[in-house]
Image (tube, grey):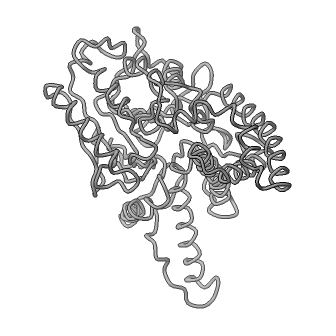
Amino acid sequence: MKLKLLPSDSGDCLLLTGAEGRHVLVDGGERSAYQRHVAAVLGRLRKKGERLDVVYVSHIDSDHIAGVLQMMDDLVAWRVRDFHANGGGGGNVSDPEVPRPPEVGQIWHNAFHEQVGKNAGPIGQTLAARATIFEGDPRKVFQDLAASSRRLANSQTEAIRLARRVGAKQLGIPVNPPSQHRLLFAREGGQGSIAVGGMRLRVLGPFERDLEKLRKEWNDWLRTHQAQLDDLQAKARADEERLGNAVERVIRPRLGQAEALARGLKLVDGLGRRSEVTTPNLASLMLLVEEAGRTILLTGDGHWEDILKGLRQVGKLGAQGGVHVNVLKVQHHGSEHNIKDEFVKAVTADHYVFCGNGANENPDPRVVDLIARSRQAGSPVVGSTPEATTRPFKFWFNSSESASVAAPAHMRAVEQQVRALAQASGGRMRFSFQKTKPQVLTV
């Protein structure tokens, strides 16, 4: 297997190719990164007469789904061109000014409306309204909340657009064929693998009961926040000067930790804090890929507890409660909330892939340090094999100081940190930072 790390700005975008030449696109990154970098890579795939057998969207956050939506928009533009070129619309038509993407066999994507039902639209509207309210307060904590609400609202809009793009009336790409076109999730009691050429893909998460819980949380969130927003908007209309006080009175009691984070006062024990992981991230579709005895763990933005639960469900955790894989795509861009020491002891890898360009302070330096130090000789590795602490390993980053527009200073600090860790490893740890061309990891 080969894993190509594609530039994705703050998100994920990987191209997985099996030994038989079958391709899986793992998320699409941000729209701008897709346009600048990924479209050309996939266009060359098309010119070679190849296709994407599966497009796998881990979850609906914009930094994972936006690039996929752009690819689908480009496919539509080229199909419209074909329709006119074949006399269907009459008149001359020029080629779209974008590379033609490869055809897509199927897409694995848990659509937002399938996850939450009839309240999908109102949730998106409430998020957008909440963002507008928070934008009225100049303090950084509220500006951060406004930005996060706006991103999530946009992600849900993109998820709905993607569902329409791939539907029968437009591109007609089958969605989730392995689960009869319904939500794709890990089944209690285990399930078989899904073949993509010689690759075997197992769904590790989310679980159905977790999706039910998430659906309830979304709907509870809607009821609570809609009432708050109605109150805020009424007060704002009555007296614009009271907006700040109204926001503070209703929302402030819930912002203690958020405000601490805004001041940079991150908690020392904050690693793995599940309460800080967003609902869409907890619904990440996660996969274990196997071919010819080689393994790749694709985690989306999932939480460490759910990854271990999924691995346990499919019988991949050994007697000591852990596993060694060839490649671990480090969950959520190396965010501190999605990983903990129990996880890095239980899951070891030859290659650790970090996606992200420093935005939102990811990869988090504490996570980079945690993983590297878990592989030091003598570390209490649960996971895998006893020799895991002596095997060489490599960190891969799909960005760098020179490639990052969002946070070059953060990436510079990460590069310095990684060099120091590698030097201290006695030659066991290697690393690679992506600058311009995509990197290819051969598994």
Hey, which quadrant is residue 116 in on the image?
Answer: top right
- Answer above or below: position of 129 versus 322: below
Q: Is residue 65 left or right of residue 14?
A: right
- Answer above or below: position of 376 versus 111: above
Hey, which quadrant is residue 278 in on the image?
Answer: top right
Q: Is residue 42 left or right of residue 61?
A: left
Instruction: Write the residue at 42% across / 41% down.
Output: 361
Estimate the x, y position of residue 269 in percent, counting from the top left: 46, 20
Query: Where's the C terminus, which quadrant?
Result: top left
Estimate the x, y position of residue 407 in percent, counting from the top left: 38, 50
Most extreme residue toward the bottom is 91
Which is more toward the observer, 352 or 56? 352
Q: Is residue 230 left or right of residue 308?
A: right
Instruction: Write the residue at 25% across / 18% down.
Output: 389
Most extreme residue toward the left is 426
Which is more toward the observer, 298 or 151? 151
Estimate the x, y position of residue 276 in percent, counting from the top left: 57, 31
Instruction: Write the residue at 61% across / 39% down.
Output: 280
Q: How many marks?
A: 0
Hey, which quadrant is residue 169 in on the image?
Answer: bottom right
Query: Where's the N terminus, which quadrant?
Result: top left
Which is more toward the observer, 260 or 295? 260
Instruction: Write the residue at 43% across / 43% down.
Output: 197
Which is more toward the observer, 200 or 417? 417
Estimate the x, y position of residue 136 in percent, counting from the top left: 68, 53
Most extreme residue toward the front is 241
